[in-house]
Structures are given as C-alpha cells and as structure tokens.
Image (spheres, grey):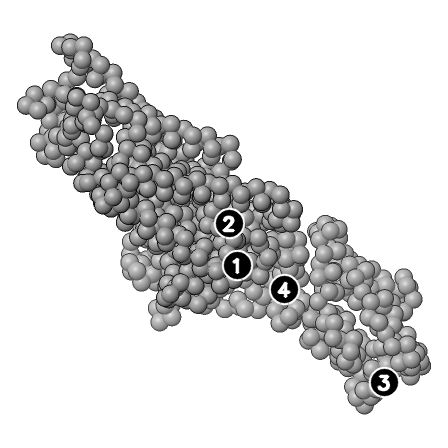
Amino acid sequence: MADAPSKFDEGSPTDSPSSTRRGILGATAAALGAGLAATVLGPAVIFVAHPLRHETTSGSDDFIPAGPPSLFTTTTPIKVDLFADRVDAWNRVVQVKVGSAWVMEKGGKLVALSTVCPHLGCGVDYDTSHNKFYCACHKTWFGLDGSVEEGPSPRAMDELEVESAEKLVSIRFRRFKLGVKTKEPIG
Amino acid sequence: MRILELLEERSGIASAWRNFADRPWPGGPAVRHSLFAVVIYLFLQQAILGVLLSMYYSPSSSDAWASTAYLVDTVELGWFIRGLHDHGASAFILAAVAYLTSLVVFSGYRRPRELVWVAALGVLALGLAEGMTGNPLPWDETGYWAIQVELGIAEQTPGGSIIKQLVQGGSQAGNFTLTRLFVLHAFVLPAVLGALLLFIAKQRNRVGVGSAPPRGRTGTYAPGQLVLDMAAMTIAAGSLIAATISSHGTELMAPADPTSGFQARPEWYFLFLYKLRMYFEGPNEAIATMVIPGLAGGFLVAIPVMEAVAGRLGRVLALLGYSSLLAGAAVLTNVALRDDRGDESYQKALKEANVQAERARRLAKEGVMPEGGPAVFWNDPEFKVKQLYIEHCRNCHELDGFGGGEAPALTDYSSREWLSAVIRNPSDDRFFGKTKHTDMDAYGPDKIDAEKLAATVEFLASLTDDMGADAALAATGEKLWDDELECSTCHEIEAGKASDAPNLYRHGTLAWVERVIRDSSQPDLFGKAAQMPKFTDKLSDEEITSLAKFVVARRSPAAADDS
C-alpha cells in the first residue's frame, strides 16, 4: 500500500502487463458504471426539467367579468377580486380567485391597476388617509395614477386592460415580471 | 492528479476508494458474489427514482391519483421513471430471493455469518413491505383495494386493529392513509433497509463473503469482482429498461372508488399468499394468512441454528425446506395466474376496468377538479355543460341559487310552481322585472284564485309533451285561458304563430329552450324587444342542445305532483 498514490498514474509508460490488465478491467468497470448512471440520470434530467419546457399552470388570458358598471362610479379606488378558471398541474379549478385589481374612474374612463407590487410581488393596498397606494412590504408609495412616489419599486403599478360594456366591466388580469423597469407579461 | 492529491489530503477520498477496491477477496471473483451488488444497485436506483417521483406526486386522497396520472401521461418521460420504479420493485424482490438462495446453496449463513443471513431475510421482508406500502400510493383501483385487503388481513391478527388504525391514520381510508403509507414507503422502510444492507456490506468486509474454501489465492476486490459486479448491475439495469419500454411503463387504473366492485388482485409477489388463502375458508383463514407464513418465516430464521444443532441433518433440512418453500410459492403463483386466465368473469371485469382506466386517464389530461380522484369523470360532457352554463348564462339567469338577477330565473324553469309564480307577478325580479318584457299584467289572488291558477297552469302543461298533465283540470284551464283571463289576446298557443307575447305552445320543453338559446328574438318568441344574446353562431349545435337539456332536466321532477 506504500506506493498506493501511483495508482492514479495507471496507464503511464511504465506499465507492466498485469497493470495493463488491471487498467483495462478498471476502465471497463468505469465505463459500465458511467453507462449505468446515464440510464437513470439522463431521463431524470428530462423528467425534472419538464416545467422548463412545458407550461404547468395557466390562468385565463381573457377578460374576466369584474361586475356591473354601477359598482365603479367613484374616483376612489375599489378593490375587485377576479375569478377565472385555472389549471394548476393536475388540477383544473373552476372560478377561483386568480388576482385582484384596484379599479377607479379617471376622466370618464375606468382604470384598473394590478394589486401585485412590481417590486417583489407583495400586495399593494390603498391608504385612505393619504389617498395613495402603499405597499407595506418594502414601503413603496404610489400615486393614484400608479406612479412611484417613494420607495424601491422600479416601475409604476401595472395597469390592466379594462373593457366596459353596457352591463359588465371586464378586466384582463396578467402578471408581469417583477423587479424590472419595463412591464413584461409572464406566463 | 494534483487536484486528486489535494482532495485526498483533505478528505481521504482516494484512500477510501483504495480500501474499497483493494480489500482482500478470498477465492477470487465469482458471479454469485455479484448478487448482493445487484441488490445494492437496485436499492440505490429505487431511492433515486423515488425521489424523482416525489417531485410530481402528492400524497393526499384527492391528489394522489390525479398527480400520478399527470406524472405518467403529461410529464416528459414520467411513464419511464414510474415504470422503472415499479419494475425495479419486482427486480429488487427477485434479486433479494436470488441472494438468499445463493446464501443457502453456498452455506453463507454459517457461523459467523448467521446475522448476515437474518439481515438478508430482513432485506426481502422490507422489499415486500416497500411493495405493500408503495402500490397503494397512486390511489387507483388496484392500489386502493390491495391496501384494503392487506389491512383487513392485518386486522385479524391479535392487536391487528391497532396496527390497521395506525397505518390507515383512522378508522377509514383517507388522507392520513396516504401520508402515512408515503412516510413508511419513502422514509422509514428505506432507512431500515439501507441500514440492513450497510450491515451486510460491513460484515462481508469483516468476515468475507462466503464459506467456500479459498482456492489458494487471495486477490483483491478490484478489478476482477468489481468488473463482475458492474456487469451484473448492467444486465439488471438493461433488463429493467427493456421491460419498462416494452410494457410502456406500468399500469395506472381508474381512480379509487370505494363503491366499485373492482376485482382486486395483489402484485405478483403476493399472489402465492392470495392463492394460499383460498384453500382455507372461514375460521381456517388464519392458517393461510398467519400460521403458514409465520412458520415459514420462523423456519427461515432458524436455518443457521438447525445446522449448528443438527449438523449434516440440519443442512439437509435447510436445503429441503428452503427449496420446497420456493417451489411452493412458485406453484401457487402459477396456479393463481392460470386460474385468473381461465376465469371468464375476472377477465371481463379486467377488460372493463382497463376501459375505465383509459377513459379516466384521457379525461385527466384536461385537469382534474380539486375534489380529485373520481372527480376526473366530471370532465365528461355532462359536467362540461355546467361549465358552459356558468360561462354563458349565469351572469343573467339564476340557477340553483347562483348568479342571475337580470333575466328569468331558471331554477325549476317552466315547472308548475314557476308558471304559477310568473302569472302572479311576471314583473318580479325573479322573472321579467329587469327585462323589457314588463307589459303583462300581474294576476294576483284578487283576479284569479288558487284553484283557477292551478287549472291555467295545468292547461299550459298539457301543451307540452313532457309534463304529463291532468286532462280534466287542463280542460278547465283552457276555458279560463280563452274566456275569463283573455290570455289569448297576447299569447298564441298554436305552433309557429306570432303574436305580441311569446307563443306558449310547448313552453319550456327542450325544443322551446333550444330555440330561445339560438335566437330569442323570433316573432313567435320574445320578438324585437328580446335582449338575450343570440347563441346560434356563438355555440355549436351540440352545445346548445346540451345547455337546453341541462336546463330542462333540472326542472324538479316533484313539480308534477304539487300545484
């Protein structure tokens, strides 16, 4: 065992016939071992990476009914929960809450702002005493138009598309990439 | 090489490998010594595959089946990973039996290796227990019924009802059954199994692998035995992969349904016990479920003792006993398989179960409702129509207490109660109050008493083909209709005739509702004032028919009896 470290040098020019045999057998064993590992690890990588190549959750990309127009007649923001069908891996859930929005009237039009803070995704609340939006997690203040007034949020609150029909106001709820300056939809 | 030396200095990894590879191997390399390596290999592979499966599997009674179906049918190579794990379990049991057999044949249980033998028996027992706890995890028909029967058998043993409640997590199968089976299968049993395998491996290093006399030369483990071991593992892995691919994974039956008459059969490695039980009816059942397996287990554990006590006779007994146990199990397994092949009713049930499984898995691809398991069948068209209703109708039309307020409620639509209430107060918000059809007078009790109202409604019912009207009462109603109440001024009752108000011929029947859904603004329906969207172009004919059926079929059947 004294010369054991030289084992790493097997296959060097000083090979004797017996160490050549050992080397071939050792290489065979190593090759078989590598093959064995590959038969499980190869499929395993594909198996584990499934969510990278396939959508595993999906919500509704359509406009979601938020309520009749009579609900949204003030310039004070009103929070509405949006319900839609959702697929979550093996589950399909009907009419589950997929998101919320602050809705208010502005210049005769309805404006909807996502309650998801663009900073790190906390819920943005409406502060009645200041008449401003406030994200309590990391203390960002947003104006009523959604613009950042103070705090770490990299961009204004995300505006959502609103469709006002005679009897029904609908909102298209989307999620956007967090922590970046531009508003990029995800999913 | 420098890196290896640095690593060696800090971890001893290279010398650990050398100690492993260069340990003395008396007698030189032999194929039989590789059986244990195959057991180890299968154990490790099962552990890795198990971890992978847990990444997609959810052990709850509502999610177990759906998550397994997703794993198998949607996740890339999910069928392969699960198939390999399932076939791997069978292979592990075969390998454990082969290893035990080699210990018997080559006297590997003799002093000082008695505990190796007992540990090896433990490895087989734990392998079987892994199968027992693993097979129910998908919570499909096979798995559910298997654990039901197994726990039922356990319950008959002394103190068994406590074991059953502990494993089941209550008096009935449910969420805790799966969490507990999962914990046993994925943590507890593998930990014990791993410890036993480690113990055997250590003993093999300490006292050698067998009692066969060294043939004069003592080599080292590597490379001879190492290559043999690797080759044996490769053969095992290759046949497993071949089996998995040729069977395209493994079966997943329909979700567990405690009310189904599923003809449960255990896994192949329990078939001999299943068959054995059939020869012992009634009170004798315990002979098959406990006495014989108990005696067999006791005998196996006692093999080293017998030889120590009785010498050659003990050896003969051990060989005879062990081989007859193996042969007995093999014969019983064969009989069980043969009987099932010849059993027409079982084959028919099996076929039906497979059809049901295929249907469930097809429906599961759309996603299973959160209720899980059998809720997969809600994806059937019948359930779909409800979704269609929620999407297109519920905003305006109330049904079963949900939605509505804008247009007539459809709960019990056009039933006698509904018709009576409309006549009493058509402009109520439950009916036409929020629509433009508010011209009709209300017929309160002052204008028409309850008796006359019932007769009028009966007359309307007689115009349909599906409400089974009382002819005499309807005749009274018809007179009221024309003369006293003057309904006919506005409402036609002859097919197709247009008038100011909806023609009530066959009001509320399937055909009528279908026409309203298509286009309610036709002159003999609600005319130009109709506000309901025309669905004739928005929905398929099939969808319109299914929606109409949905509304009509939900009219309470009891309605024909009140009034």
Q: What residue sits 71% from the left and 67% below the top?
A: B554
Is disc 2 surrounded by few (<14), some (14 to 19) or many (20+) residues within 10 Å?
A: many
Q: Nearer the viewer, mark 3 or mark 1?
A: 1
Both on one chain, marks 3 and 1? yes
Indicate the position of residue B121 as horizontal and vertical percent values: 31, 45
Residue type, label 3? Lys
Q: Circle 2 sits on which residue?
A: B275
Chain letter, disc 1 residue: B
In contact (CB < 8 Å): disc 1 and disc 2? no
Q: What whole-number distance in Å separates the C-alpha atoms at marks 3 and 1?
A: 69 Å
Quadrant for the C terminus of chain B, please: bottom right
Chain letter, disc 2 residue: B
- Along the horizontal axis of the image, is A119 left or right of B510? left
Q: What whole-number distance in Å separates the C-alpha atoms at marks 1 and 2?
A: 12 Å
Q: What whole-number distance in Å separates the C-alpha atoms at marks 3 and 4?
A: 35 Å
Q: Quadrant of the rendered structure where residue B78 is?
A: top left
- Residue B281 badge: 1
Q: Earlier in the sequence, mark 3 or mark 2?
A: 2
Q: Circle 3 sits on which residue?
A: B452
Is disc 1 surrounded by few (<14), some (14 to 19) or many (20+) residues within 10 Å?
A: few
Q: Circle 4 sits on which residue?
A: B395
Chain letter, disc 3 residue: B
Residue type, label 2? Lys
In contact (CB < 8 Å): disc 1 and disc 4? no
